[in-house]
Image (cartoon, rainbow, N blue to C red):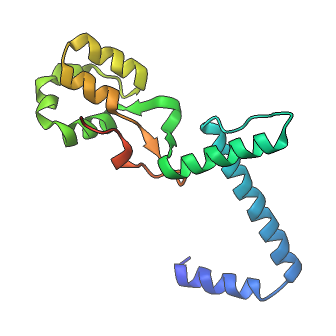
């Protein structure tokens, strides 16, 4: 269905049955609340305290931190291709210089394992870039390339 047709159909539905509209709105709000809780939970933002104000403050604080900086994708798992893209942007010569290192990486690796492997090479540039790499994603699920580490 084309975008214009979907919009026209939705406008027609919104002008129709008010009870249906309120049910759909409630369903959508509940789904968005579940999604928000899931995102905040991935950043360790859910806590339970005897002080409900402290619990609410922690949730809000983590939520705004996530909105500003994102969350770690897939619990610190990264793809070899994404890391190679990052290295290519910051030090393209390093890819060729350490081609054996990159060839030996699995398709998916934990960030901490990547750093450990980089340390065994003795390459200060590879260690630095591995340590600076942050596989962040926005709350909307889009990668944040600029936040993937700062090449020092």
Is 100 on the left-hand or right-hand side of 66? left
Residue lying farthest to the top in this orientation: 120
| Quarter of the rendering containing residue 62 | top right
Q: Which residue appears at 35% of the width and 21% of the height?
A: 114
Q: Which residue appears at 11% of the width and 29% of the height?
A: 96
Q: Percent x, y for residue 20? A: 84, 76
Total count of labels: 0
Q: Percent x, y for residue 36? A: 67, 51
As rendered, which of 51 and 19 lies closer to the eye? 51
Is 28 on the left-hand or right-hand side of 18? left
As rendered, which of 67 and 92 lies closer to the eye? 67
Q: Which residue appears at 18% of the width and 18% of the height?
A: 123
Residue lying farthest to the right in this orientation: 19
Q: Which residue appears at 77% of the width and 89% of the height?
A: 15
Vertical placement of residue 91 versus 38, above or below: above
Quarter of the image where the N terminus is located = bottom right
Quarter of the image where the C terminus is located = top left
Q: Is residue 102 visible?
A: no
As rendered, which of 80 and 92 lies closer to the eye? 92
Q: Is residue 79 visible?
A: yes
Q: Percent x, y for residue 115? A: 34, 20
């Amino acid at each position: 269905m084309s975008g214009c047709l979907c919009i026209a159909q939705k406008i027609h539905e919104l002008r129709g049955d008010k009870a249906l509209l309120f049910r759909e709105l409630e369903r959508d709000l509940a789904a968005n609340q579940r999604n928000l809780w899931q995102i905040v939970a991935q950043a360790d933002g859910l806590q339970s305290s005897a002080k409900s104000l402290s619990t609410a403050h922690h949730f809000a604080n983590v939520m705004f931190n996530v909105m500003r900086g994102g969350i770690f994708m897939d619990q610190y798992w990264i793809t070899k291709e994404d890391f190679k893209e990052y290295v290519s942007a910051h030090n393209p010569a390093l890819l060729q210089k350490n081609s054996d290192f990159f060839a030996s990486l699995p398709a998916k690796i934990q960030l901490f394992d990547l750093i450990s492997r980089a340390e065994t090479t003795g390459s200060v540039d590879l260690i630095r870039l591995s340590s600076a790499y942050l596989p962040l994603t926005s709350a909307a699920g889009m990668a944040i390339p600029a936040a993937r580490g700062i090449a020092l």
